Image: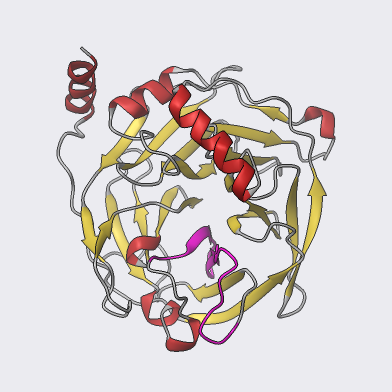
């Protein structure tokens, strides 16, 4: 019965076949790189541009987020404490929840914050991978007003029926919120990766039509610049919204792609492999480490979660890279 329901959802959503991601058409140019100091748990796992300030989260810290002081080449992370209320049930099965709880005793961080975004009013929205939930931190900074969004349980059910959110440590890896603060896109990481949209007509966040915009399986070769390149699962490691378009960070292929916000169809991709995989910037880790993305008119900020590992040049701190926008801007046609 369950398999039949899942197939029906896939067919109705037009997601039964795996689409092919277009090859990157251009390499982005690196403008600067910035080590980040002061993150208690390290593991920079999300970025957001709130007004003219950059904010970040760590997947090891449950009780604080960070504003980044970008006034010097080495950035300082200034902590902002948050009081997090009990996490509501999201519909994840007991097996996944128990594995997440067990992992938290080893790595630290029960909530596993993996993405942050802001609306035009400056409210922050943070996604918890471990609980498939979204925390709202008000712009005023009043701790008592921090709250988990009320999300209809059908969202998780539909995502799981489409093949997403089935595997430990492969749940929601990023989110983007529109300026009005009434629509959120969520990125499921891998096996299957996908994109989900929910809206808030009143107090409950729910699907407006299908929740699942994209559900995609399959593998793809890592870029040739990667030592011992091999075929790996397609993934999303963060998502950003800029000028009405979605931008997905796809760390397995060292690229970011512009997508239609309604259909999730790929419109254009850009690679950052040349710069990120320069010999001095390589890590002795077999996969891409980019987990944080911000897009603005001038370029892209890409942050790395290096898991405390050192680059070839010995740098161990979390890193944020600044790339220039492509010639003609982010709306350029292929």
- Observer able to see residue 208: no
Task: Please provide percent x and percent y for residue 238.
Answer: 47, 52
- Closer to the camera in the image, 100 or 222: 100
Q: Residue at x 65, y 52 (%)?
A: 57
Task: Please provide percent x and percent y for residue 183.
Answer: 51, 33
- Closer to the camera in the image, 18 or 287: 287
Q: Residue at x 52, y 23 (%)?
A: 90
Q: In the rendered view, does 218 fall on the left or right side of 298?
A: left
Q: In the rendered view, does 322 fall on the left or right side of 221?
A: right
Q: Which quadrant holds the N terminus?
A: top left
Q: Residue at x 69, y 57 (%)?
A: 41
Q: Is residue 292 magenta?
A: yes
Q: Is residue 248 magenta?
A: no
Q: Residue at x 63, y 42 (%)?
A: 105
- Observer able to see residue 321: yes
Q: In the rendered view, does 10 fall on the left or right side of 288?
A: left
| Highlighted magenta segment, given as a residue range | 287-314
Task: Please provide percent x and percent y for residue 259.
Answer: 34, 51
Task: Please provide percent x and percent y for residue 145.
Answer: 79, 28
């Amino acid at each position: 019965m369950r398999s039949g329901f899942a197939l029906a959802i896939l067919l109705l959503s037009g997601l039964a076949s795996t689409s092919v991601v277009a090859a990157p058409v251009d390499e982005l140019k690196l403008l600067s790189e910035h080590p980040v100091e002061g993150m208690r748990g390290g593991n920079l796992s999300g970025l957001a541009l709130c007004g003219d300030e950059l904010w970040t989260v760590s997947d090891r810290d449950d009780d604080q987020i960070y504003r980044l002081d970008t006034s010097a080449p080495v950035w300082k992370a200034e902590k902002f404490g948050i009081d997090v209320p009990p996490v509501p049930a999201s519909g994840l099965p007991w097996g996944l929840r128990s594995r997440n709880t067990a992992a938290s005793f080893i790595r630290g961080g029960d909530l596993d914050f993996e993405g942050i975004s802001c609306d035009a009013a400056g409210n922050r929205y943070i996604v918890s991978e471990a609980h498939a939930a979204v925390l709202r931190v008000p712009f005023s900074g009043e701790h008592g007003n921090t709250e988990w969004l009320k999300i209809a349980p059908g969202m998780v059910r539909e995502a799981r029926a489409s093949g997403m959110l089935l595997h430990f440590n492969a749940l929601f890896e990023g989110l983007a919120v529109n300026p009005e603060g009434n629509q959120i896109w969520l990125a499921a990481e891998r096996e299957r990766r996908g994109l989900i949209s929910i809206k808030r007509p009143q107090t409950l966040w729910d699907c407006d039509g299908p929740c699942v915009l994209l559900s995609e399986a399959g593998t793809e070769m890592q870029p040739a610049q990667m030592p011992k390149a091999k075929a790996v699962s397609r993934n999303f490691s963060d998502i950003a919204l800029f000028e009405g378009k979605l931008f997905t960070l796809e760390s397995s292929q060292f690229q970011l792609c512009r997508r239609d916000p309604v259909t999730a169809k790929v419109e254009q991709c850009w690679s950052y492999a040349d710069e990120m995989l320069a010999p001095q910037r390589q890590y002795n880790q077999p996969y891409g480490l980019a987990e944080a993305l911000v897009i603005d008119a001038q370029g892209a900020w890409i942050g790395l979660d290096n898991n405390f590992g050192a680059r070839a040049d010995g740098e161990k701190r979390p890193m944020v890279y600044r790339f220039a926008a492509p010639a003609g801007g982010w709306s350029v046609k292929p």
